[in-house]
Amino acid sequence: MKPLRIAAALATLALGAAALPSVSGTARAAAPAAEAQAPATAEAQWIDRATVVWKVEHTAATAEELRSADGRTLRLTPASLTDAQKAAYPHLADRPAFSLDPRDRDKAATALRGPLAAVQRAADDRDHVLHRTGVQIPGVLDDLYADRARRARLGPVFHGARPTLSVWAPTARSVSLDLDGRTVAMRRDARSGVWSVTGTSDWRDKPYRYRVRVWAPSVGRTVTNEVTDPYATALTADSARSLVTDLADPRLAPAGWDSLKKPRAVPLRDARIQELQIRDFSIADRTSAHPGQYLAFTDQDSDGMRHLRRLARSGTSYVHLLPAFDFGTVPERRSDQTRPGCDLAALPADSDQQQKCVAATADRDGYNWGYDPLHPTVPEGSYASDPDGPGRTREFRRMVQGLARAGLRTVMDVVYNHTVAAGQDDASVLDRIVPGYYQRLLDDGSVATSTCCPGTAPEHAMMGKLVVDSLVTWAKQYKVDGFRFDLMGHHPKANILAVRKALDALTPAEDGVDGKSIILYGEGWNFGEVADDARFVQATQRHMAGTGIATFSDRARDAVRGGGPFDEDPRVQGFASGLFTDPNGSPAGGTPDEQRARLLHAQDLIKVGLSGNLADYTFTDTGGRRVKGSEVDYNGSPAGYAAAPGDALAYADAHDNETLYDALAYKLPATTPAADRARAQVLALATAALSQGPALSQAGTDLLRSKSLDRNSYDSGDWFNALHWACEDGNGFGRGLPPAADNQSKWPYATPLLTNPSARPGCPEITGASGAYRDLLRIRTTEKAFSQATAEGVQDALSFPLSGTGETPGVITMRLDRLVVVFNATPSRQSQTVPALAGTPYGLHPVQAHGSDATVKTSTYERATGTFTVPGRTVAVYAAEATGR
């Protein structure tokens, strides 16, 4: 994911109450004197009903206490954290701790429902305050309420025709229901902190919000918030109100929904995934009757759906949809959306005017990737034909049906690690119901934003519950077949394993789905305030190994492309982009000797990737050493970290950073012909497609998709993002300089490229690349050797017979059971002699021998010497003919 356009919201949070706009539907009472003195920070942390952690030094001359709004004092005495507390709060393990006086512990629940301060005073003078700060309360809320609240069914729940609405708001002074313009009282359960009310059958599909009177630390006062339901199942347009909707209502089930037959479930280790943004898919498709909508996937004769069916027949098994839940940055009614006011197509290929025109309407157009979650369990309204009401549920289900009919299962990209806003912002939902609980707080009480946005805290019981409950709903009610977690490393490993356990419990007989067949994978990056397990054991690459939940592997991706996503000079080359074998002249490349050394190390990284990133896979590296995958270095980390095939997900590009075509455009020599650029693209894709374990590619990458060199197109509109299925429409390259916000520093490199005729492919290159890629997918799908179930099976079947000090720079020769695969990334024809195979009959694999790529058909094999000769920038797969093929 990438940072979103929420700078204004973050600035509001930083400026505090004085900067807050008036909030629609929110009444703010005048603050009483006690509230007016609320501390600006919250450095004390009340971690359970008996313990406060606070970084102050206790002496004989000081006394520490909590003071509540009603003037009560909760006395504190110095204490030590237990081993269990230190394990639960590792970032607090070395901090001073205080124990709440047993005589005051029954005051906790009342104190938590108003302003609270931790005070250090002089021991002999109550009015002599030495230090005063606010109090963080998530830990004590979990201790008091979570056991009971975890079992509650929140949001709208129907018992027959009667709905019950429930919301967890333990710190609220009162909660009522605003139902279709009238106020309905709600009852609080003191043991769980849940407020609920049961209605009548005429409540069905009525709009509602909760009216929550609660202390809000971000503004230092008690407020009455009218706020939508975080457990909403349906919404009015622009998320203004929740709807009392029953997802089991037959009116929301399209014809054939209950009897829907999905394509055969594919194990995660064999998944071949197309990552796709819903609007990108069809907005520029002239053959689609529903451009930019869920229903575009029901247009079975559109160019886009025809292409997805071709991929499915070749071995693609899943379509991964970028965020399709309700998000916060797109006007949902088409009549409210704006369009760029320029004739974009008439502007020069290297002009800065296209991006300027697109940026002028970006905040109000119909485009955003959607990594700005608002209501995580409701389909996004801007993709529906009518966003106002539960009809979007029906259309989302029809999309799932359309993909299934095309032979594809559905994966959802889900974002629970952050929200679009926090505090008293209009777009804040969770934090206006239980302020200071759902968002992860830093030491001073401010909201963590390392995720780009106000971070959430899935380590807290009720945020973790929200994640699990939401995903179970998507699986049961929408028949989603897999989930990709955005910034999964910001979740506890335990939270993701709880998701796995909950999904595994779903059965066709009871729930209509086989939960065990649902695949899970995510971004296991390690950074921010949670890095290195600072607060919990994270769901990062190394920790998820062996869980059956995959993480994206950046190792081979960087080796194949070259450099990294944030290089100042984007021309740093890699295996597929000509490093050493076809240098582009950039000074960032270094000397020829340095390039050669980097290339050979890149080849070792790719070999680890081809093994499925296995930590214990053993091979000879290019230095002649016998090494394990975990002993190959990747920027100071082990290249191999997986315990079994399926732990690591291979990819050469995704929505983040430049498309593969654009990355190669920067890195290949400027004179590289379009045909060679297409071949380099297929070769790069092959390193992921032919790996052990799952692989993902961005939609359109097989068609040489370009975003005109944009490295972060999350808000770049249709002009830069739309997919072009018809080759005569081009591949998106040369649509102007990419948006300045994230690309201006690269404009000096981009400008000459965008007008370079050799960088603009035509139909022969576009269709040729797609056909060659599909041939490789067919081979991967039909040859069982690519689907090893265990690390031991990979070790036995996979080898690199020419790896060592004599390895050819730019060529990897892989032996896999009865197959030999030669990846020749150099621009010239190369021969690879494997003496151990001399006398063994091999021939080009039948799929390639009868396939779409004329160049690969010129590959040869000399049986007498065991020599495989492969054209430049080509992947050739050979099969031993002794098997009877």
Image (tube, grey):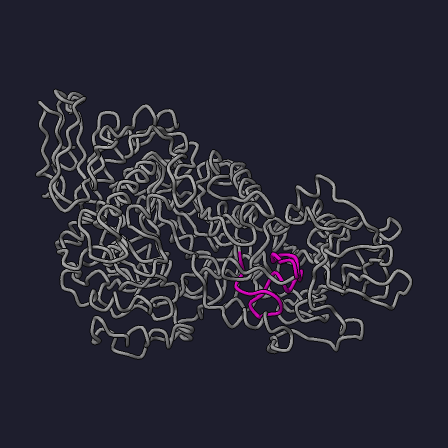
Give the overall secondary structure of the magenta segment: loop
392, 192: nearer the viewer: 192
Relative vertical location of residue 201 with respect to residue 600 in this rendering, above or below: below
Rendered image quadrant of residue 642: top left
Residue 655 at x, y percent in the picture: 36, 56
Q: Residue at x 59, y 78 (%)?
A: 21
Is residue 681 among the parts visible in the rendering? Answer: no
Q: Is residue 244 left or right of residue 718?
A: right
Residue at x-position 69% and y-position 70%: 224
**Number of marks in the rendered image:** 0
The quadrant of the rendering that contains the C terminus is: top left
Hey, which quadrant is residue 726 in on the image? bottom left
Q: Residue at x 34, y 71 (%)?
A: 740
Residue 436, how many percent across, how many down?
66, 60
In which quadrant of the rendered image does the N terminus lie? Answer: bottom left
Along the line of sight, the residue nearer the viewer: 16 or 386: 16
Relative image position of residue 548 (x, y in whole percent): 46, 36
Q: Is 782 in the magenta?
A: no
Specify the quadrant of the image occupied by residue 178. bottom right
Instruction: Classify 568 as above or below 780.
Output: below
Q: Residue at x 32, y 77 (%)?
A: 357
Residue 437 shown in magenta: yes
On the question of residue 322 being in view, the answer is: yes
Q: Which is nearer the eye, 320 or 151?
A: 320
User: Who is closer to the viewer here, 203 or 269?
Assistant: 269
Q: Which residues are magenta?
A: 418-444
- Could you tell me residue 52's position as x and y percent? 76, 52
